[in-house]
Amino acid sequence: MAKTDVILCVDDEENQLTIRKFLLEREGYEVLIASSGQQALELLSRCEIDLVLSDHLMPGLTGAELARQIKLRKPDLPVILISAVNEIPPGAEFANIFMSKLDGPVAMCKNIASLLERTRRSQSSERFEGRDFAGC
Amino acid sequence: MEQKVNILMVDDQPGKLLTYEAILGELGENLIKASSGREALDCLLRTDVAVVLMDVSMPELDGFQLAEMIRQHPRFEKIAIIFISAVHLTDLDKLKGYQRGAMDYISVPVVPELLRAKVSVFAELHRKARELESLNRDLEQRVQQRTAELREREMQLRQRADLLDLATEAIMVRDMQGILQFWNSGAEAFYGYSRQEAIGRNVNQMLRTRYPNPPDEIESVVLRGGRWEGNVLQTTKDGREVVVASRQVLQRDGSDAGPAILEINRDITAQLRAEEALRRAEKLAAMGRVAGIIAHEINNPLEALRNIFYLLRSHPSLDDAALTYARIADEELTRVSHITRQTLSFYRESKDAVPVMISDIINDILSLQSRLLESHAIVVEKLYLSDGLVSGFPGELRQVFLNLIGNAIQAMPKGGLLRIRISEVMRREHHPEGVRVSICDTGSGIAPQDAKQLFEPFFTTKSTKGTGLGLWISRGIVQKYKGIIRFRSVKLLKGNITAFSVFIPKSASPEISELGLVSSASTS
């Protein structure tokens, strides 16, 4: 039974957030939304989240700063920064992937899927290497 | 009004003195009486005496002896002495008298007219002599004064000239006709004409001065207001055109030749060029900033729209027609994204340069454009003498070749030949090793009048689409790689051949900068 991945979508623009949520739900993900970096961190502390998809330019914490904060708390949690700016901002390296909103929905979904896959694989390989040997 | 002279009469007999006084009173001069040699000498020393009238035989002193004493004094060497002698003088005595320097004799009984005549002659002589002396002194004084003035003036001028020579600005003085009278070393250095070459020539002719207003207008401003300031265009001796900040001041008492104009000129050519470059850079920077803002503002709703149509494309409630509309909308929006990405930034996909095969990029582009190439009936010829391996960002390089190949295709709407050549360039003096790509088409060609502006932003020869930014962006990217982009267009009988050539050095990695759009554009 495959667990549905939970994606946390962060964006200060309501329309964007709503559409992205619809789209990702169509792709089969469970989606939580936050309209600020602060809200996102709060949700992170309460809920189980598999991937964070965040806008960069937001009031308060920028996406890059949010990525840094997330990595401080949960270094293994994959973060994708999706932005409308045309230049890669400083601090983007805290995220696993930086992509442009111009890349389109197909690219976005592909990035999400491949990142989740990679994360899953690395987690399972760690387990296999004996980090977590529970009974079955 | 003539000055009175002093006449000294010496006689031991007062009666005689009175007689002389009576006779000479008519002359209107100063008569001084002395009754002894001592008195006479005393008087001579105190007063300026013109004539001495002397009795030859006096008790204390022999007239001759007195005369001798008088004559010995350097002051009285030439003083006129008239001897009056009662004693009958022989010629020998007369001679003795003359030897002692007497000027004249008059015998007793004295003939009044004769005495008056002789005295007045000497008096007049003396007066004239004194007048001459005074005139001389006067003249001498004036000459001295004038000499001192001139020397002072010369020193001032020399000091000023020294100061002016220290100035690096061009300083000149010219008369109202424009003839140069002064030309400092700053002017020599700046304009290239030596002092000898410049002085005497008409300044505006020599320098081919171009004024912002008609020259006679400016001259009248100087004459009325005393000064004029403005920028003028001039040409140096070696033919260089310079822009000069000129300041002209009227000098009313210039030289003896009338008013003159002092002109001080400063070279502002470099300054203006720098200002212009700065303005251009600022404009581009502003454009870059605006572009960034627009990009961000457009990209957000654009993404939302694309997501919506992506959702709609597979929505179960839509019929075929609606699905088609959704699909087309999706395609158009993709195109818009492409355009905004291309025109509003240099989007870099990663932070580090990677090895890039230009042959791969071009092949990619050609396959992307295959439908268009077919519909335009364009034959493609590939001449890859090398893979074209360079270090860089594939997205940017793709943009450059997409632009060039796209232009070539658009130039051949009714068929033609597109030849693409990739070759390695070996290292040469002043030329690093790298990859050269040439894209050649047989299309409409580039008109000579367009050639100069081809790489300028917003310049386009295409009547319909085209932002006019393609080549400008491409050049910017090539410059970032420290490469070269060139073109040549030749008009032949059966058509035109246009070739664009791009050179990318192998080792130079493109300059990483935060400004992206701005820095590459302003390195033009």
Image (cartoon, rainbow, N blue to C red):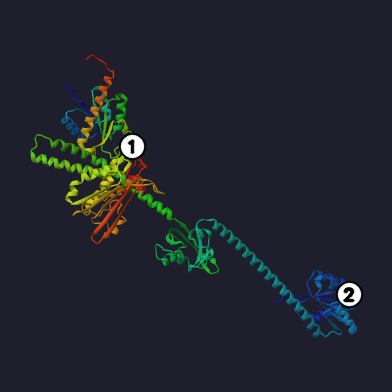
Q: Are marks 1 and 2 in contact (CB under 8 Å)?
A: no
Above or below, B384 relative to B213: above
Location of residue B137 by image quarter: bottom right
Amino acid type, label 1: Asp
Front position among marks 1 and 2: 1
Looking at the image, the residue that sits furthest to the right is B59
- As drawn, is B303 to the left or to the right of B482? left
- Tell me if residue B15 comes above or below residue B456 in the rendering: below
Q: Residues within 10 Å of mark 2 (few under 14, many from 20)?
A: some
SS label for mark 1: loop
Host chain of mark 1: B
Nearer-the-camera pick, B130 or B491 = B491
Q: Which of A27 and A135 is in front in this view?
A: A135
* Left or right relative to B324: residue B16: right
Q: Quadrant of residue B25?
A: bottom right
Residue depicted at x 33% and y 37%: B352
Q: What residue type is labelled 2?
A: Gln
- Residue A120 at what x, y percent from top left? 24, 25
Q: Mark 2 lies on which chain?
A: B
Residue A93, compared with residue B497, is above or below; it is above
Q: Mark 1 points at which residue?
A: B352
Across and down, in percent, residue B513 comes to 35, 41
Q: Which mark is residue B65?
A: 2
Q: Is residue B287 above or below residue B221?
A: above
- Secondary structure state at the residue bearing disc 2: helix
Instruction: Classify mark 1: residues with Cα within 10 Å, few (<14), some (14-19) or many (20+).
Output: few
**Where does residue A102 sit, x and y in percent of width and height?**
23, 39
User: Cα distance, mark 1 to mark 2?
Assistant: 128 Å
View extreme (left): residue: B319
**Residue B175 in picture, x, y percent from top left:** 50, 67
Residue drawn at point x = 38 percent, y = 51 percent? B277
Image quadrant in which the C terminus of chain A is located: top left
